[in-house]
Image (spheres, rainbow, N blue to C red):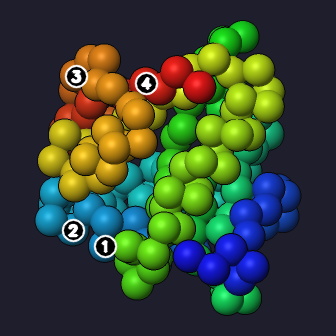
Amino acid sequence: MQQEKTSIRKAARHEAPVIHQLALDIWPKAFEEILTEPQIAYMLDRMYALPVLEAEMDRGVEYFILNHDGKDAGYTAIEQKDPTSWKLHKIYLSQGLHGKGLGKYQLQTMEAVAGGYGAVYLYLNVNRHNKALGFYKSQGYEVIKTEDIDIGNGFFMNDYQLRKHL
């Protein structure tokens, strides 16, 4: 990775449309082999509609946008859960940039941000069939529990919850 061409910025509330568009471009491709099209459409609306993104920002979820070669190409989101724990809600990168170290850069940046806020642990959820599970384990995350989360409309998120001591 050429770091001089890559940066991560904290997203301002007025950048919610940027995150929305990145999600529309990235998210369905990330889950096309795991989830059905109806579930992908339902989750995109539930998680990435502009009012949802703005409400999350208003309640303290911090979004970050990765820019590579002058183009916004990924996003992350973290939120404080308690005095010692933060949760990484989202970490996505344009598929054409996978394998270049940028996802690792995103993850390490979020760990540094959370650690800078005093976090001792960073948690995340990952679909049990997501190939990213191996990536997270290689970065020091451990599976601490299995969750089947009812998200409505007959859909579930079948996840592992992972944790890393920062």
Alpha carbon distance from label 3 to label 2: 22 Å
Is label 2 in contact with label 4 (beta carbons under 8 Å)?
no
Left or right for 67, reference 31: right
The residue mark sitting in front, 2 or 4, is: 4
In the drawing, what numbered circle is on residue 146? 3
Q: Along the line of sight, which residue is nearer the eye, 73 or 165?
A: 165
Residue located 75% across and 79% down the image: 4
Which residue type carries mark 4?
Arg
The residue mark sitting in front, 3 or 2, is: 3
Question: Can residue 52 be seen?
Answer: no
In the drawing, what numbered circle is on residue 32? 2
Name the residue beneath numbered marker 4.
163
Name the residue beneath numbered marker 1.
29
Residue located 43% across and 24% down the image: 163
Is label 1 in contact with label 3 (beta carbons under 8 Å)?
no
Is label 1 in contact with label 2 (beta carbons under 8 Å)?
yes
The answer to which image quadrant residue 95 occupies is bottom left
Question: Can residue 70 be seen?
Answer: yes
Q: Position of residue 32 (x, y in %)?
A: 21, 68
Q: Along the line of sight, which residue is nearer the eye, 83 or 44?
A: 83
Tell me if residue 46 comes above or below residue 65 in the rendering: above
Which residue type carries mark 2?
Glu
Alpha carbon distance from label 1 to label 2: 5 Å
* SS at badge 1: helix
Alpha carbon distance from label 3 to label 4: 12 Å
The residue mark sitting in front, 1 or 4, is: 4
Q: Position of residue 123 (x, y in %)?
A: 48, 27
* SS at badge 2: loop
Is label 1 in contact with label 4 (beta carbons under 8 Å)?
no
